[in-house]
């Protein structure tokens, strides 16, 4: 149960990480462009 939960949270983090990168990149581009 605990192992399954840990792996599930890992999968969620894997899915969220690229989205965070997209947001960070978007903020950088928004900051460089007036």
Image (spheres, rainbow, N blue to C red):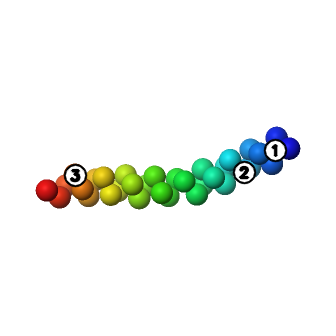
Q: Secondary structure at mark 3?
A: helix
Q: Are marks 3 and 1 in contact (CB under 8 Å)?
A: no
Query: Circle 1 sits on which residue?
Result: 3
Percent across and percent down for residue 15 are 58, 57
Q: Secondary structure at mark 1?
A: helix
Q: Are marks 2 and 3 in contact (CB under 8 Å)?
A: no
Q: Earlier in the sequence, mark 1 or mark 2?
A: 1
Q: Is residue 21 left or right of residue 25?
A: right
- Using the numbered discs, state the Cα–Cα distance from disc 2 to disc 3 in whole angstroms: 35 Å
Q: Residue 26 shows which numbered tag?
A: none
Q: Is residue 7 left or right of residue 19?
A: right
Query: Circle 3 sits on which residue?
Result: 31
**Which part of the image, by quadrant, shows the C terminus?**
bottom left
Percent across and percent down for residue 22 are 41, 58
Which residue sits at x=72%, y=51%? 8
Q: Is residue 9 left or right of residue 26?
A: right
Which residue sits at x=26%, y=58%? 29
- The 10 Å Cα crowd at callout 1, few under 14, some 14 to 19, many 20 or more, is few
Q: Earlier in the sequence, mark 3 or mark 1?
A: 1
- Using the numbered discs, state the Cα–Cα distance from disc 1 to disc 2 in whole angstroms: 9 Å
């Amino acid at each position: 149960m605990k192992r399954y939960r840990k792996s599930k949270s890992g999968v969620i983090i894997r899915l969220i990480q690229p989205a965070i990168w997209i947001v960070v990149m978007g903020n950088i581009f928004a900051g460089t462009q007036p």
